[in-house]
Image: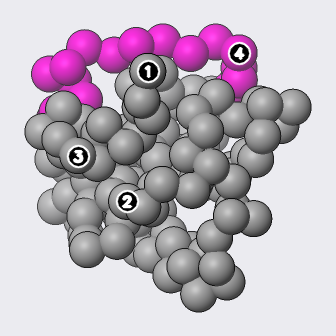
Amino acid sequence: MGCTFCEIVKDAGKGHIIYEDDEHLAFLDLYPITEGHSLVVPKRHHEMITDMSPDDAGRLFSIVPSIARAVLLGTGADAFSLGQNNGRAARQIVPHVHVHIIPRYSGRETVWTSRGMPEAGELAGLASRIRERL
């Protein structure tokens, strides 16, 4: 079985894309921790960030602020967390470098182990609202 994120990169129509450039893709997580939980990935496969050159890692992280800002505006979230896990022991589920942008909402408790799967139409509408803010 191939890499899930490489498959999304290859056929971006399968994901709820919120950002794309020549080297990166950002899309909504299908199993979000909170509404608007997004992933930013390099298009080129790297299992862990230590496999990337410093320049490649720098370019990846340089686009995160504008995507996070769009996620905040598109969701109405009050804040956000970033996450970047490397290796199975760090709970990296998909072995392809990715940065989590996890919106946070005042008055809503976040349960990290309680992840749902929103309907495709809900994700499509949310992705559209976020893209409009970029």
* Vertical placement of residue 94 versus 99, above or below: above
> CA separation, marks 4 and 1?
25 Å
Q: Looking at the image, which residue sits at the far bottom?
A: 55
Q: Does dot 3 land on a helix, a strand or a loop?
A: helix
> CA separation, marks 2 and 3?
9 Å
- Residue 108 image point, x, y percent: 63, 28
Q: Which residue is mark 2?
A: 43
- Residue 114 image point, x, y percent: 64, 12
Name the amino acid type tagged 3. Answer: Lys
> CA separation, marks 3 and 1?
15 Å
Q: Which residue is mark 1?
A: 1
Q: Which residue is mark 4?
A: 113
Name the amino acid type tagged 2. Answer: Lys
Is label 4 in contact with label 1 (beta carbons under 8 Å)? no
Q: Residue at x 59, y 87 (%)?
A: 55
* Bounds of the magenta segment: 109-125
**Which of disc 3 and disc 2 is earlier in sequence?**
3
Is label 3 in contact with label 1 (beta carbons under 8 Å)? no
Residue 32 in sight: yes
Q: Does dot 4 land on a helix, a strand or a loop?
A: loop
Name the amino acid type tagged 4. Answer: Thr
Name the amino acid type tagged 1. Answer: Met
**Which of disc 1 and disc 3 is earlier in sequence?**
1
Left or right: residue 1 versus residue 100 is left
